[in-house]
Amino acid sequence: MVACHTFAFIWGLIAEPREPGHCGHTRIAISTASQFCRSIRLRRLEIRDLRFNAFSTFSQLGRGSKVSGKMSEVLRTTWVKLQALIALIGFAAITPLLILVAVLSRLIAKLCCCSAPKCIEGEVAVVTGAGHGLGRAISLELARKGCHIAVVDINVSGAESTVKQIQDIYGVRAKAYKANVTSHSELVELNTKVVADLGPVTVLVNNAGVMLHRNMINPDPADVQLMIDVNLTSHFWTKLVFLPKMKVLRRGFIVTISSLAGVVPLPYSTGYTATKAGTLAHMRALRMEMALENQKDIHVTTVLPTFLRTNSEITQLTDSMGINDLYPLVTGEEAAHRIVAGMLRGEAEITLPGLASLLYRLIHIFPADWQDRMILLLSSSRFKQLRDERS
Ligand SMILES: NC(=O)c1ccc[n+]([C@@H]2O[C@H](COP(=O)([O-])OP(=O)(O)OC[C@H]3O[C@@H](n4cnc5c(N)ncnc54)[C@H](O)[C@@H]3O)[C@@H](O)[C@H]2O)c1
């Protein structure tokens, strides 16, 4: 007890109350030991009270947290439901607006673009597979717009025939070049020659393509490989060869002839279908790359034609499938006119005929298995007949 008093005295001298609720130890020190002891007791009580209070508060809180836990769970569930409801209402409300914005922006873009198609007079175009069919028609259309044409084909006599037609009608320069688009080195060589003969290339038309249907059930592996090389791989090589200069000049057009088969698959034409879907995806990615690189004057246009009246094999195929009875096939000249007009307006994708664009977009709303059924519903008998003929 003495020790306690002494300690209290000394501690009372050195310790000062610092905050409310702190035991006034100075005061305590100069008072009696009993006061000190009381103070200690009180403090103990205070602490016990505090502990008790804290305990009760915590237990209350604990009880409360259990209650609030239950409450928050209910609240959370309600909140999630409410959010979902808000999202649903928002989505329902915004959908017509989105459609309206999409339609309006497309209309505005079309009107603005229509008013200002780009001029390509004096530019140099490379058209692959230009010795026949659509390539030839596109070459003639570009020449009509004042473009100088490098007519590229593996079939050199076809290319020369195209050049002759261009020179007979239009006063532009045109030259035939023999090159295989599946060979990167041949394309590098081609670029050197074209630049020396005509100037730097600012228009590239990836038109060369093959559709090989010798055996529909068991296609020859060489045929499949050739379709991949000509229809898909070659576009990587032409891009590597011709795009760098366009980037330096900060202008250019890349037109790629894909096919509607790239979005509406053709059974027993998996090789062709896959290559055309690949070119579509390739050009979409390239368009985004140009936007990311701020190359807004390099336009990438992909063309998705249905069957065209461009070569005898296609005419024979469409005849045997009875497609000619369904709708009149677009000619190469009609297609070329639409393609070059769209290219000059910087259109991203062109579907031929235009109505096919609406149809394939509508079909794409449905689940994949429904889409398959819808396509087969329209054409299964035709595909079966074709398979039986060519297997
Ligand atoms: N004709 C159609 O119904 C149709 C439909 C959709 C898409 N397409 C696509 O349109 C493009 C042109 O079709 P088309 O009907 O005018 O074809 P086409 O067969 O009449 O002409 C293709 C030309 O490409 C050339 N060619 C082929 N392989 C080549 C190579 N490795 N290197 C260089 N030239 C090569 C050929 O010699 C030919 O002159 C193709 O890409 C084709 O897939 C055609």
Image (spheres, rainbow, N blue to C red):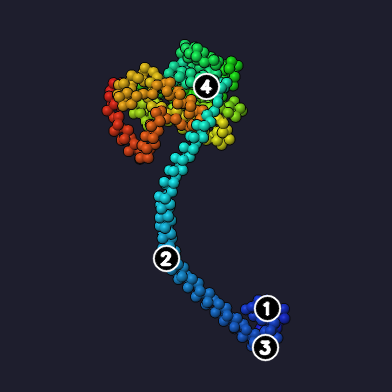
Give residue 40's quadrant in the image.
bottom right
Q: Quadrant of the N terminus?
A: bottom right
Residue at mark 2 to residue at mark 4: CA–CA distance = 75 Å
Q: Amino acid at mark 2?
A: Lys
Q: Residues within 10 Å of mark 4 (few under 14, many from 20)?
A: some
Q: Nearer the viewer, mark 4 or mark 3?
A: 4
Cβ–Cβ under 8 Å for marks 2 and 4: no
Residue at mark 1 to residue at mark 4: CA–CA distance = 97 Å
Q: Amino acid at mark 3?
A: Thr
Q: Amino acid at mark 4?
A: Lys
Residue at mark 2 to residue at mark 3: CA–CA distance = 54 Å
Residue at image mark 4: 145
Residue at mark 1 to residue at mark 2: CA–CA distance = 44 Å
Residue 70, numbered label: 2
Dot placed on the residue nearer the N-terminal end, 1 or 2: 1
194 vs 23, nearest the viewer? 194
Cβ–Cβ under 8 Å for marks 1 and 3: no
Dot placed on the residue nearer the N-terminal end, 4 or 3: 3
Residue at image mark 3: 32
Q: Nearer the viewer, mark 1 or mark 4?
A: 4
Dot placed on the residue nearer the N-terminal end, 2 or 3: 3
Judging from the image, what secondary structure is the residue with disc 3 in? loop
